[in-house]
Amino acid sequence: MTYTTTEENYIKAIYHLEHEHESVGTNLLSAAMQTKPASVTDMLKKLEAKKLLHYEKYRGFRLSDQGNKLALTIIRKHRLWEYFLVEKLGFNWDEVHVLAEQLEHVSSEDLIRRLDEFLEHPAFDPHGDPIPDVKGKFRKINQDNLLGLPLKKNLKVSAVKNQESEMLNLLTQYEIKIGTQLKILRRFAYDGSVEIRIEKNAATILSKQVAQHIYCNL
Amino acid sequence: MTYTTTEENYIKAIYHLEHEHESVGTNLLSAAMQTKPASVTDMLKKLEAKKLLHYEKYRGFRLSDQGNKLALTIIRKHRLWEYFLVEKLGFNWDEVHVLAEQLEHVSSEDLIRRLDEFLEHPAFDPHGDPIPDVKGKFRKINQDNLLGLPLKKNLKVSAVKNQESEMLNLLTQYEIKIGTQLKILRRFAYDGSVEIRIEKNAATILSKQVAQHIYCNL
DNA sequence: GTAACAATTTAGACAAATCTAAATTAATAA
DNA sequence: TTATTAATTTAGATTTGTCTAAATTGTTAC
Ligand SMILES: [Mn+2]
Ligand SMILES: [Mn+2]
Ligand SMILES: [Mn+2]
Ligand SMILES: [Mn+2]
């Protein structure tokens, strides 16, 4: 079976929404896809016909096993390309997502197998997101965000869960990236902000908004 | 301006045909694009509207300067990706063309600039075709095919002008690739075949059909 | 338990790229 | 120079993914 870029993008979006929300409907999906609900309905029928999801009209939809598998291969491609762009071509981590959106649709199992090998089987992309292996399995890691982690421990940044350009730029400003060593000094109850020390630098205060998206290994 | 994959493929095809034939018409182009002449006419109007070519109906068409420039950037991308696939990912030279057909349409000047840098500015792709630089200029080389080159000289294979899989497979069989050293021993008038010695190996005879597509530096 | 509202689907239309069949134009051959 | 042929274009239809406006259904609030 072969799928259009649009179909692949829908499947990937549904996959992500299913993991971020307990309930996913036509409206939510249409917002994520930047289309109208009516267009989503049309596509749902098409995807059901291709057995990528289960769908009962007016009741809801859910990725099928086949759809889930497809989503994972697209995510695998996306994240491997992002890794390539940063590690081999020297892009910044905030520049690679849009490019990976194009590259993830290049279709060749052989290509992705060789790319994975060339990159020496990375387990995480430049934003700390896990890269599924050929079988769709993720490497598990224990991590939590700066709101939940203990004070005064040495922590290593393992992921950033908001990847908007503004966020990544801000983190670059703070000199925070994947792998950065830091320690939480204290939390301020008033606004939820968090004081941290990055490596040997002076202490800094991060807003709650920023802190909640920074994850570190336990 | 941004162009669809289809538009880019038409422009690239026209570019190649203009260099291979003194006259290019709707029929020839439709054969190259594997479509019907009527579809070509539709597309010609679209491409003219985008100023990529000059077109007078029933009289003919020709790439505009802008169209020519676009063709060269697509060819540049195609050949850089082919080089990447062979040199970095270890593909065989007969496997990369179809993949490059997809990759050439990924649109990002920055990406191609960095890829070119990463590959250290290659001047020729894995089949010996020249890679245009950012300005669309080709590195010139003096080369001729095995039917025109002198006997008993040390020659180096610089290009293969037929890149069908069957041809490339055959050459792999003969252990001929870009850079291979060889010497022409003699030519047989009867069928135009050519006897050569590859490096220190035993002599072999190539058919005229094969020999005419193998080019060596003068 | 029903009325109101929100979510979802249908109907009908459009742009892109293609097709088949028919019409038009250019080229060429007598 | 005119008739025939070959190349090209037009007309009208199809598929994919989208839209707007209208209709339908499911869910809540009273
Ligand atoms: Mn991404
Ligand atoms: Mn995508
Ligand atoms: Mn090629
Ligand atoms: Mn192409």
Image (spheres, coloured by chain):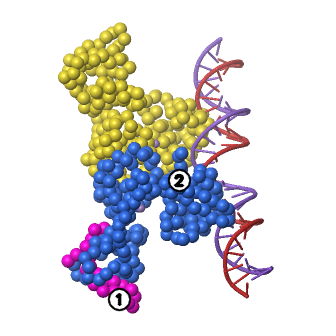
Chain colours: A blue, B yellow, C purple, D red
Depth check: A81 or A91 in front?
A81
- As for residue A181 lying within the magenta part, the answer is yes
Q: Position of residue C28 (x, y in %)?
A: 58, 19
The disc at residue A66 is: 2
Q: CA distance from mark 2 to mark 1?
A: 47 Å
Position above or below: B193 against B31: above
Q: Quadrant of residue B177?
A: top left
Query: Local crowd at mark 1 within 10 Å, few (<14), some, or many (≥20)?
Result: few
Name of the residue lying farthest toward the bottom: A190
Q: Secondary structure at mark 1?
A: loop
Q: Which residue is mark 1?
A: A188
Placement of the C terminus of chain B among the 4 image quadrants: top left
Q: Which residues are magenta?
A: A175-200
The residue at the point 46 percent across, 33 percent down is B17
Q: Position of residue B36 (x, y in %)?
A: 59, 35
On the image, the x and y values in percent for residue A32 come to 53, 66
The chain containing the residue under callout 2 comes to A
Do the CB atoms of the residues marked 2 and 1 lie less than 8 Å apart? Answer: no
The quarter of the picture where residue A213 lies is bottom left
- Mark 2 secondary-structure assignment: helix
Q: Position of residue A53 (x, y in %)?
A: 58, 57
Q: Is residue A24 visible?
A: yes
Establish whether labels 2 and 1 are both on one chain. yes
Give the mark nearer the N terminus: 2 vs 1.
2
